Amino acid sequence: MTYARTEPTDQEPDIRARPPLVREFLLVAGLFLAYKFGRRAANGHVEEAFRNAGNVWDLERALHLPGEGAVQGVLLHSQTLIHAANTYYATVHFPATVLFLVWLYWRRPLHYLWSRRILAVLTGGALVLHLLFPLAPPRMLPAAGLVDTGQVYGPTVYGATPATDTMANQFAAMPSLHVGWAVMVAVGLIVATRSRWRWLWLLHPAITLLVVVGTANHYWLDAIVVMALLAVALAALRLPRAARNVPAHLPWTVPGGRADAPAYAVSGAEAAADSYVIGAAHPARTPAGPVHPARTPAGAGAGR
């Protein structure tokens, strides 16, 4: 039996795979607080941070990486553009990641568990590097000749005196979690959805990379290192097979609302009913021509 096909609807979540909400909230909040306090513990290594910054700058020039100033020069052509870049840096990073996790938790529980583990491993690895390799961002490095766009044009999330900033560790540039989290958000949404437009999520990490470099908050190497960490995490923590095997959409539907179920999923009673209805609607036709009466064996009616 053939049904007319319409556009597929979205996949329903497997609620059995969804972990308890309160437990997940406490877990994610605890990981975030541990990371924030860990970054604060890495603060105060000012001389080492500037020495490392000089080494990173020299290494980038030796590797012939493009200068961060080229990106900043484009942004500085428009005060509106540089203000938008500062706003993006200050306001998009954390809320976008939270919304990503909330949506996965509600709509793709298996993908949520996988993404949460990846982000936890990536953030933990970044914290280790922050502790071992304090790094002043390029906006603080005189040799770079860059503008601290946050302080000059606003808005900014950092204090004017980095050494005494009690809100954030400004010497934790390596690696860039702005870029790392943005890439994971894009990867997670591309893997968890089937829309033909899903590849546009790559615009988020692309814009984030240009923003963190153009505002002089990160070096190119900060992004390269976090990408290497993310690649290791993705290789070590593979997407569960159950998540990969979940169909992308619900069964195809017909205008009347009935799903086109496969033959093996239809009960015998339904199959018989369908056969009867089809037969009634489309009676068998005999070939054109004379109709010959059925023949009976000779003498079949004798004796009557």
Image (cartoon, rainbow, N blue to C red):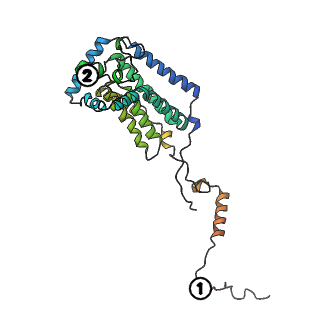
Q: Position of residue 243 (x, y in %)?
A: 50, 39
Q: Does label 1 or label 2 sit earlier along the sequence?
A: 2
For mark 2, give the secondary structure: helix
Q: Position of residue 213 (x, y in %)?
A: 31, 28
> Could you tell me which quadrant the N terminus lies in?
bottom right
The answer to whether residue 250 is seen in the rendering is yes
Q: Is residue 230 above or below residue 269?
A: above
- Amino acid residing under circle 1: Gly
Give the class, few, some or many, for how many residues have Cα within 10 Å of label 1's Cα (few <14, many ≥20). few
Which residue is denoted by mark 1 in the rendering?
Answer: 289
Q: Position of residue 182 (x, y in %)?
A: 40, 32
Tell me the number on the disc at residue 22.
Answer: none
Which image quadrant is residue 280 in?
A: bottom right
Q: Is residue 212 above or below residue 275?
A: above
Q: Is residue 110 above or below residue 297?
A: above
Relative placement, left or right, of 142 versus 32 is: left
- Amino acid residing under circle 2: Val
Tell me the number on the disc at residue 56.
Answer: 2
> Could you tell me which quadrant the C terminus lies in?
bottom right
Q: Is residue 42 above or below residue 104?
A: above
